[in-house]
Image: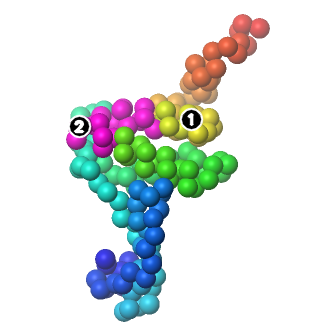
Amino acid sequence: MRCPFCGNIDTQVKDSRPAEDHVAIRRRRFCPACGGRFTTYERVQLRDLVVIKSNGRREDFDREKLERSIRISMQKRPVEPERIDQMISGIVRRLESMGETDIPSKTIGEIVMESLARIDTVAYVRFASVYKNFQAADDFEKFMSELRPDIPTEDET
């Protein structure tokens, strides 16, 4: 593994342990050239996934991109980082086990929204606001009324 600090390709593993509910291995590494320490994660990848964007463009599935978007929606929410990691791993496993290598971005978005809805409603709404491209406060209002249809709107009171 290449050292992220100096580029040396001869780094040493100092410690390995299971991570993310035993679906990954966390490795602490040491670079003898610069003395730098860093962490890597090793995960099983069942197949190479390709995301089909709404405009038809194709791009390789990027777990880090998925993780970034979920972590942004979960910012400052009272959810343990381990639970977020488990959710992300579960989403990736679900995508890999679908049997298809080409997955529409809409499918990924729906799976993420379904997972977020079970864990944290605020994160769910945050993600939905980007995923569904909300442009105005009315978009939030409409979405929230679909989320809670039993609450009357101002027009109904």
The magenta stretch spans which residues? Answer: 95-112
User: Among all residues in the image, which is located at the extreme right?
Assistant: 157
Crowding around mark 1 (Cα neighbors within 10 Å: few <14, some 14 to 19, many 20+) is: few
In the picture, the quarter occupied by the C terminus is top right
- The residue that label 2 is drawn on is 100
Q: Three-letter amino acid code at disc 1?
A: Arg
Q: Is residue 8 left or right of residue 17?
A: left
Residue appearing at x 56%, y 34% in the figure:
117
Q: Is residue 59 left or right of residue 150?
A: left
Q: Secondary structure at mark 2?
A: loop
Foreground residue, 76 or 81?
Answer: 81
In the picture, the quarter occupied by the N terminus is bottom left
Q: Three-letter amino acid code at disc 2?
A: Glu
Percent coordinates x, y for residue 78 in the rendering? 67, 49
Kindly indicate whether the residue at mark 1 contacts the one at mark 2 (C-beta within 8 angstroms).
Answer: no
Decide whether residue 111 is among the magenta residues. Answer: yes
Q: Quadrant of residue 124?
A: top right
| Above or below for 43 versus 140 | below
User: Among all residues in the image, which is located at the extreme bottom?
Assistant: 33
Mark carried by residue 118: 1
